[in-house]
Amino acid sequence: MAAAGARDDLARGRFITFEGGEGSGKSTQIRMLAERLDGAGLSTMVTREPGGSPGAEIIRHLLLSGMGRLLGAEAETLLFAAARDDHVHAVIEPALRQGSWVLCDRFFDSTRAYQGRLGKVDPALLDAMQRVTIGDLKPDLTLILDVPVDVGMRRAAARRGGGAPDRFEAEDVQFHEGLRDAYRQIAAAEPQRCIVIDANAPVGMVAAKVWRAVRDRFPEVDVSRVANLA
Ligand code: Z5A
């Protein structure tokens, strides 16, 4: 793990994270945003957590199988941190240094919401892990996709078809309500970084809101080259 402060010299692209509850549409919206940014002539990279690097993908498999839960909330949190450490070093930082715009499906706000708020893991432990895994690397923008819990759960169930829910999908409605609330609190605490997007709308409408938020935050994006602007 790297020392904090070792990453402050990034002459870099932009780092945008997507957060939200289950079925909120993050993966769908990340793909659409990447297409628009590519269209604007920017180099983009889409990645996700847990996972995003070969080592972290192995840990993802463990986590989503429910193995981490058996070890307890703190140990599960350490697994997320180990995956993030590898992902940040092997993938995110090199891409940012090369000038790419990195779009990441979940990042440390997920740990704050899932393990912190819902898993009741000590905030001091979360702070310490954040320091050693990501140091000063904060997203330039975090888009929190907000949908009512029943809508998100319906979408996820429809996508799953007959398949079994994973470790987090299997949690009850109360858990997912708590999660929604946790994300609202994160957004309220850091309004300069986080924007809540109402994602209970058709895909194209949500994409238009995402695009507006990105353009407002990064006026340097050359929109004249992007077709079908909403
Ligand atoms: N986790 C954690 O606990 N701690 C951490 O630090 C981190 C993660 C990093 C990873 O799950 C789990 O790990 C996650 C938190 C935990 N648990 N959960 N649940 P994952 O990566 O497997 O899945 P996810 O991140 O939760 O995403 P998702 O459920 O796959 O959904 P999504 O990416 O937000 O949505 P989507 O795939 O774009 O859309 C879902 C379906 O809805 C799909 O069929 C779409 O076509 C449809 N969709 C999307 N948008 C719309 C709209 N606007 N209208 C109608 N239908 C739509």
Image (cartoon, helix red, strand yellow):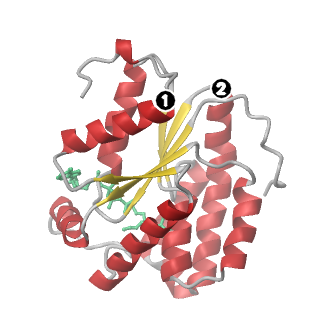
- On the image, the x and y values in percent for residue 24 come to 29, 58
Give the position of the N terminus as an image quadrant.
Answer: bottom right
Give the position of the C terminus as an image quadrant.
Answer: top left
Q: Residues within 10 Å of mark 1 (few under 14, many from 20)?
A: many
**What residue appears at the point 60 percent right and 74 percent down from the top-left corner?**
77
**On the rendered structure, is 23 left or right of 72?**
left
Question: Tag 1 or tag 2, which sits nearer the N-term?
Answer: 1
**What residue appears at the point 79 percent right and 35 percent down from the top-left corner?**
9
Q: Secondary structure at mark 2?
A: loop
Q: Is residue 228 above or below residue 86?
A: above
**On the rendered structure, is 86 left or right of 47?**
right
Looking at the picture, tell me which residue is in the foreground, 28 or 122.
Answer: 122
Q: Is residue 172 among what the camera can see?
A: no
Looking at the picture, which amino acid does disc 1 mark?
A: Thr
Q: CA distance from mark 2 to mark 1?
A: 11 Å
Looking at the picture, tell me which residue is in the foreground, 225 or 160.
Answer: 225
What label does residue 98 carry, if any? 2
The residue identified by callout 1 is 44
